[in-house]
Image: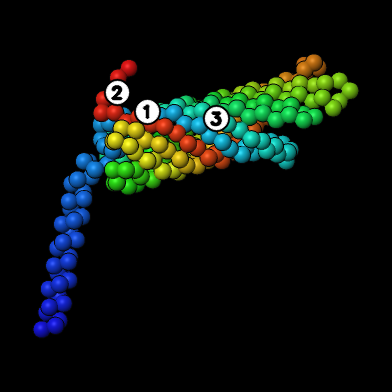
Protein backbone atom coordinates (compact mmCIF):
# COMPACT_ATOMS: atom_id res chain seq x y z
CA UNK A 1 0.00 0.00 0.00
CA UNK A 2 2.81 2.39 0.82
CA UNK A 3 4.38 1.73 -2.57
CA UNK A 4 1.08 2.41 -4.32
CA UNK A 5 0.59 5.57 -2.26
CA UNK A 6 4.11 6.78 -3.11
CA UNK A 7 3.55 5.99 -6.77
CA UNK A 8 0.30 7.96 -6.70
CA UNK A 9 2.05 10.97 -5.15
CA UNK A 10 4.85 10.88 -7.70
CA UNK A 11 2.32 10.56 -10.52
CA UNK A 12 0.32 13.54 -9.19
CA UNK A 13 3.43 15.69 -8.83
CA UNK A 14 4.44 14.72 -12.37
CA UNK A 15 1.07 15.84 -13.76
CA UNK A 16 1.27 19.14 -11.87
CA UNK A 17 4.84 19.74 -13.11
CA UNK A 18 3.87 19.10 -16.73
CA UNK A 19 0.90 21.46 -16.43
CA UNK A 20 3.12 24.14 -14.92
CA UNK A 21 5.62 23.74 -17.75
CA UNK A 22 2.84 23.90 -20.35
CA UNK A 23 1.36 27.05 -18.79
CA UNK A 24 4.81 28.61 -18.68
CA UNK A 25 5.32 27.95 -22.39
CA UNK A 26 1.92 29.35 -23.36
CA UNK A 27 2.27 32.40 -21.13
CA UNK A 28 5.82 33.19 -22.22
CA UNK A 29 4.70 35.70 -24.86
CA UNK A 30 2.57 37.47 -22.23
CA UNK A 31 5.13 37.48 -19.40
CA UNK A 32 8.32 38.43 -21.20
CA UNK A 33 8.73 42.05 -22.34
CA UNK A 34 10.93 40.73 -25.18
CA UNK A 35 7.98 39.61 -27.30
CA UNK A 36 7.82 38.84 -30.99
CA UNK A 37 7.05 41.90 -33.13
CA UNK A 38 8.28 44.50 -30.63
CA UNK A 39 11.08 47.01 -31.33
CA UNK A 40 14.03 47.81 -29.08
CA UNK A 41 16.14 50.96 -29.47
CA UNK A 42 19.03 51.66 -27.15
CA UNK A 43 21.94 53.90 -26.22
CA UNK A 44 24.86 52.56 -24.19
CA UNK A 45 28.32 53.59 -23.06
CA UNK A 46 31.46 51.63 -22.28
CA UNK A 47 34.63 51.84 -20.23
CA UNK A 48 37.36 49.45 -21.29
CA UNK A 49 40.95 48.28 -21.30
CA UNK A 50 42.31 48.18 -24.84
CA UNK A 51 45.22 46.07 -26.15
CA UNK A 52 46.68 46.84 -29.63
CA UNK A 53 49.29 44.48 -31.11
CA UNK A 54 51.22 44.91 -34.38
CA UNK A 55 52.05 41.63 -36.12
CA UNK A 56 55.44 42.61 -37.53
CA UNK A 57 56.74 43.52 -34.06
CA UNK A 58 55.64 42.28 -30.66
CA UNK A 59 54.85 45.81 -29.50
CA UNK A 60 51.70 46.07 -27.41
CA UNK A 61 49.95 49.23 -26.21
CA UNK A 62 47.40 49.34 -23.38
CA UNK A 63 45.15 52.38 -22.95
CA UNK A 64 41.91 53.43 -21.31
CA UNK A 65 38.96 53.86 -23.64
CA UNK A 66 35.39 55.13 -23.69
CA UNK A 67 32.67 54.56 -26.27
CA UNK A 68 29.11 55.32 -27.34
CA UNK A 69 26.94 52.59 -28.86
CA UNK A 70 23.64 52.99 -30.74
CA UNK A 71 21.45 50.03 -31.66
CA UNK A 72 17.94 49.22 -32.85
CA UNK A 73 16.24 45.94 -33.68
CA UNK A 74 13.07 43.91 -33.84
CA UNK A 75 12.12 40.73 -31.99
CA UNK A 76 11.68 38.23 -34.82
CA UNK A 77 10.63 35.64 -32.23
CA UNK A 78 10.05 35.75 -28.49
CA UNK A 79 13.40 36.70 -26.88
CA UNK A 80 15.26 36.71 -30.24
CA UNK A 81 16.31 40.22 -31.30
CA UNK A 82 17.70 41.02 -34.75
CA UNK A 83 18.96 44.50 -35.66
CA UNK A 84 21.85 46.80 -36.43
CA UNK A 85 24.38 48.69 -34.33
CA UNK A 86 26.78 51.60 -34.60
CA UNK A 87 29.71 51.86 -32.16
CA UNK A 88 32.05 54.84 -31.76
CA UNK A 89 35.17 54.46 -29.60
CA UNK A 90 37.95 56.87 -28.71
CA UNK A 91 41.11 56.37 -26.67
CA UNK A 92 43.91 58.76 -25.85
CA UNK A 93 47.15 58.76 -23.85
CA UNK A 94 49.83 61.37 -23.32
CA UNK A 95 53.40 61.34 -22.05
CA UNK A 96 56.54 61.53 -24.15
CA UNK A 97 54.23 59.94 -26.73
CA UNK A 98 50.79 61.41 -27.43
CA UNK A 99 48.41 58.91 -29.00
CA UNK A 100 44.78 59.23 -30.05
CA UNK A 101 42.85 56.24 -31.39
CA UNK A 102 39.36 56.27 -32.92
CA UNK A 103 37.26 53.47 -34.36
CA UNK A 104 33.85 53.23 -35.97
CA UNK A 105 32.03 49.90 -36.16
CA UNK A 106 28.78 49.21 -38.02
CA UNK A 107 27.05 45.88 -38.56
CA UNK A 108 24.07 43.62 -37.89
CA UNK A 109 23.62 41.82 -34.59
CA UNK A 110 21.51 39.14 -32.92
CA UNK A 111 20.65 38.94 -29.22
CA UNK A 112 19.01 36.17 -27.23
CA UNK A 113 17.31 36.79 -23.87
CA UNK A 114 17.54 33.68 -21.71
CA UNK A 115 14.83 34.34 -19.10
CA UNK A 116 11.04 34.60 -19.23
CA UNK A 117 10.66 36.91 -16.23
CA UNK A 118 8.74 40.16 -16.78
CA UNK A 119 11.33 42.09 -14.78
CA UNK A 120 14.34 41.24 -16.93
CA UNK A 121 16.70 38.64 -18.26
CA UNK A 122 20.27 37.64 -18.93
CA UNK A 123 21.16 38.09 -22.61
CA UNK A 124 23.93 37.34 -25.09
CA UNK A 125 24.81 39.32 -28.22
CA UNK A 126 26.81 38.46 -31.34
CA UNK A 127 27.70 40.83 -34.18
CA UNK A 128 30.02 40.93 -37.19
CA UNK A 129 30.61 44.01 -39.33
CA UNK A 130 32.84 46.68 -40.86
CA UNK A 131 35.45 48.65 -38.89
CA UNK A 132 37.03 52.02 -39.73
CA UNK A 133 40.16 52.73 -37.70
CA UNK A 134 42.40 55.80 -37.22
CA UNK A 135 45.39 56.41 -34.96
CA UNK A 136 47.56 59.51 -34.58
CA UNK A 137 50.86 59.29 -32.67
CA UNK A 138 53.19 62.17 -31.86
CA UNK A 139 56.77 61.66 -30.55
CA UNK A 140 58.24 64.61 -28.68
CA UNK A 141 61.35 63.02 -27.15
CA UNK A 142 63.30 63.20 -30.42
CA UNK A 143 65.51 66.00 -31.75
CA UNK A 144 62.74 66.73 -34.27
CA UNK A 145 59.11 65.93 -33.31
CA UNK A 146 57.51 63.21 -35.44
CA UNK A 147 53.84 62.55 -36.07
CA UNK A 148 52.55 59.30 -37.53
CA UNK A 149 49.01 58.89 -38.87
CA UNK A 150 47.60 55.39 -39.45
CA UNK A 151 44.22 54.83 -41.07
CA UNK A 152 42.35 51.92 -42.61
CA UNK A 153 39.41 49.53 -42.54
CA UNK A 154 38.69 45.91 -41.84
CA UNK A 155 36.48 43.29 -40.21
CA UNK A 156 35.23 43.04 -36.64
CA UNK A 157 33.42 40.63 -34.30
CA UNK A 158 31.58 41.63 -31.13
CA UNK A 159 30.36 39.31 -28.37
CA UNK A 160 28.40 40.52 -25.36
CA UNK A 161 26.97 39.12 -22.13
CA UNK A 162 24.77 41.11 -19.77
CA UNK A 163 21.57 41.58 -17.81
CA UNK A 164 18.60 43.72 -18.82
CA UNK A 165 16.26 45.07 -16.10
CA UNK A 166 12.82 46.13 -17.37
CA UNK A 167 10.46 48.75 -15.91
CA UNK A 168 6.77 48.94 -16.91
CA UNK A 169 7.29 46.61 -19.87
CA UNK A 170 8.86 49.46 -21.92
CA UNK A 171 12.07 50.76 -20.31
CA UNK A 172 15.16 48.56 -19.92
CA UNK A 173 18.49 49.22 -18.22
CA UNK A 174 21.42 47.05 -19.32
CA UNK A 175 24.71 46.20 -17.67
CA UNK A 176 27.30 43.77 -18.98
CA UNK A 177 30.63 43.00 -20.66
CA UNK A 178 31.64 43.13 -24.33
CA UNK A 179 34.53 41.41 -26.08
CA UNK A 180 35.46 43.06 -29.40
CA UNK A 181 38.11 41.90 -31.88
CA UNK A 182 39.03 43.90 -34.99
CA UNK A 183 41.32 42.88 -37.86
CA UNK A 184 42.38 46.01 -39.74
CA UNK A 185 44.72 46.82 -42.64
CA UNK A 186 46.17 50.30 -42.19
CA UNK A 187 48.24 52.78 -44.23
CA UNK A 188 50.84 54.75 -42.26
CA UNK A 189 52.33 58.16 -43.03
CA UNK A 190 55.10 59.88 -41.09
CA UNK A 191 55.28 63.65 -40.96
CA UNK A 192 57.25 65.74 -41.78
CA UNK A 193 59.37 63.12 -43.64
CA UNK A 194 56.42 61.83 -45.73
CA UNK A 195 57.42 58.16 -45.24
CA UNK A 196 54.57 55.79 -46.17
CA UNK A 197 54.03 52.17 -45.10
CA UNK A 198 51.34 49.61 -44.30
CA UNK A 199 50.59 47.13 -41.49
CA UNK A 200 48.08 44.52 -40.36
CA UNK A 201 46.65 45.42 -36.96
CA UNK A 202 44.72 43.30 -34.46
CA UNK A 203 42.69 45.25 -31.89
CA UNK A 204 41.18 43.41 -28.93
CA UNK A 205 38.86 45.17 -26.53
CA UNK A 206 37.17 44.04 -23.29
CA UNK A 207 34.62 46.59 -22.11
CA UNK A 208 32.24 47.10 -19.20
CA UNK A 209 28.98 48.47 -20.65
CA UNK A 210 25.86 50.17 -19.28
CA UNK A 211 22.88 51.29 -21.30
CA UNK A 212 19.29 52.49 -21.61
CA UNK A 213 16.70 50.95 -23.97
CA UNK A 214 13.13 51.71 -25.03
CA UNK A 215 10.88 48.78 -26.02
CA UNK A 216 7.85 49.62 -28.19
CA UNK A 217 5.12 47.61 -29.90
CA UNK A 218 5.51 49.73 -33.06
CA UNK A 219 8.51 51.59 -34.46
CA UNK A 220 7.91 55.14 -35.67
CA UNK A 221 10.39 57.17 -37.71
Q: Is residue 5 left or right of residue 25?
A: left
Dot 1: element: strand
Badge 3: residue crowd in 10 Å (few <14, some 14–19, many ≥20): some
Q: CA distance from mark 3 to mark 1?
A: 17 Å
Q: Residues within 10 Å of mark 1 (few under 14, many from 20)?
A: some
- Residue 153, horizontal then vertical, whole percent: 58, 25
Dot 3 or dot 1, earlier in sequence: 1
Using the rendered image of the protein, determine whether residue 154 is visible from the camera's viewpoint: no
In contact (CB < 8 Å): disc 2 and disc 1: yes
Residue at point 40% right, 36% down?
A: 173
Instruction: Identify which residue is drawn at 29% across, 35% down.
Output: 168
Q: Residue 46's spot in the image, x, y percent?
A: 53, 34
Q: Residue furthest front?
A: 168
Quadrant of the image containing the N terminus: bottom left
Mark positioned earlier in the residue sequence (2 or 3)? 3
**Circle 3 sits in a helix, a strand or a loop, which is it?**
strand
Q: Give the residue pinned by disc 3.
A: 67
User: Number of callouts in the render?
Assistant: 3
Colour style of the rendered protein structure: rainbow
Q: Residue at x 82, y 21 (%)?
A: 145
Q: CA distance from mark 2 to mark 1?
A: 9 Å
Q: Determine the secondary structure under disc 2.
A: loop
Front-lying residue, 155 or 136? 136
> Relative to residue 7, is residue 193 depicted above or below?
above
> Which numbered marker is on residue 219?
2
**Residue 216 position within the rendered picture, expressed as x and y whole percent measured from the top left:** 29, 28
Residue that carries the numbered disc 1 in the rendered image: 41
Does 6 sit above or below residue 88? below
Q: Indicate the quadrant where residue 40 lies.
A: top left
Amino acid sequence: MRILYLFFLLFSFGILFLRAQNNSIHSDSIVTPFREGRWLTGLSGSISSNSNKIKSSEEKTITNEFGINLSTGKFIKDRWLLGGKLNLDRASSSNSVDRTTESLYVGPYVSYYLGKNSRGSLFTTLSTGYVRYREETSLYNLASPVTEIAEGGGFGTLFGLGYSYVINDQIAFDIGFDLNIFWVGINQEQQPSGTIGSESLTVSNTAFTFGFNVILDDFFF
